[in-house]
Image (tube, grey):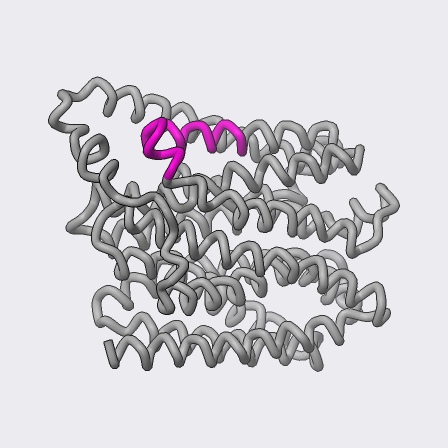
Amino acid sequence: MLAAINLRPGITSLAPLIERIATELSLSRGLIGLSTALPVLCMGLMAPFAPRLALRFGLERTVALCLGLIAGALLMRLAAESSVVLIGSAVVLGVGIAVAGPLLSGFIKRHFVDRVGPVAAWYSLGMALGGAGGAVLTVSVTQWLGDRWTYGLAIWALPAGVALLFWLFLAHRLNSLPSAASEPLASTESDEPAGLPWRESRAWLISCFFALQSGLFYAVATWLVARYAEAGLSPMRSNALFSLLMLCGLPSAFLLPWLAQRFGIRYQLLLLCALVATLCLSMLTFMPSWLPEIWAILLGFALSGSFAMALVLPLYEADSPMAVSRWTAMMLCAGYSMASFTPILTGLGRDLAGSYQLPFMVLTGLALLMCGLAWRLHSSARKG
């Protein structure tokens, strides 16, 4: 959970401040969208290296290294009044998150083989907590720190540093165990291929669903506050609605994976989340100021819940910790690489169209496509 908490604040903390940052740095919305898109792209491009790094350096040590990269990237934001530093920190942040994600799934598969469902739910909850914290607390912390937005972004290096200390201790403790205790990593997993399952059609289905889900989440996380402001809502209410969306994702991040494990209905729940997301995004597109709290609550529940369930799908498709890491690495590689374009294209669409309505209309279409993929996953699972 400590590791999971640090996988999202570096991205979600930008959203409440993104219009202010764009104005102060004189950046277009398409360019400022890189601050969200580049971590997502790096998360995709670097994910395939995660299993190889784990085999070479050890899973726990590699996770600790990733947390160090995340902490370092966030500290760089103390100097983020330079757009080069801001974008550079996004790249380093993405590398750390990219490698840690697949390995944490493998960690769960190795150490909690009889409790995958509950532990995966806590892992998802940790990610949701971190994402919500970045969205909800950044503005208040920024004001408390003299209204310096660079300080508000860099403060998230503190929880990453705390998690790093725990993981360094864990890696040292496991390294000091008798050799028999660490034998599964050294022998069993080293005999497995480190390549990704590119020829598995079901791996592609999962990856494409993850791409759509992640693209929608990061586009919403980047531009929702701006969409509300354009619709005439006050800055305070716009930020409050975004915070509400992130907070309402907390129960679904834990509850939906548990329900999926308990009743074997993970694909039905994925379809339900996709349908709810489609409805909510259509309301944000055409009627953003009508009952916005309702749609923020439902959208947060749907996006966070579908992400939590999609994230653990490889745990049910592979049998060993390394195989899980390989499936997860492919899902993150293909998924995040495709998803990274969504925040950028949303910002470019705003620059070209002059409003956020057209880009959000496209996002609604992507959510509808996500419904089709969820149905396909469900139907192919019944046949298999």
Residue shown at 47% from the left, 32% from the top: 67
- Picture residue at 42% right of the left edge, 40% below the top: 50
Q: On the rendered image, what quadrant is the N terminus found in? A: top left
Residue 373 point in image, percent of width and height: 45, 76
Q: Position of residue 102 (x, y in %)?
A: 39, 46
The correct choice, above or below, for 334 with respect to 47 in the image is: below
Tell me if residue 150 can be seen.
Answer: yes
The residue at the point 54 percent across, 30 percent down is: 71
* Residue 305 x, y percent position in the rendering: 42, 64
Which residue is drawn at the image coordinates 60% and 32% (left, top)? 73
Which quadrant of the structure image shows residue 383?
bottom left
Splitting the image into 4 quarters, where does residue 245 fall? Answer: bottom right
Name the main secondary structure of what is drawn in magenta: helix
- Vertical placement of residue 282 versus 299, above or below: below
Q: How many marks?
A: 0
Residue 193 percent across, percent down from the top left:
30, 45
Locate the C terminus and report the quarter of the image it occupies: bottom left
In the foreground, 263 or 331 = 331
Q: What segment carries the magenta color?
A: 52-70
Does residue 374 show up magenta in the picture?
no
The image quadrant of residue 143 is top right
In the shown orientation, is residue 27 left or right of residue 245? right
Identify whether 180 is placed above or below 30: above
Is 67 magenta? The answer is yes
Report the residue that reaches farthest toward the left: 180
Regarding residue 301, the answer to whether it shows in the image is no
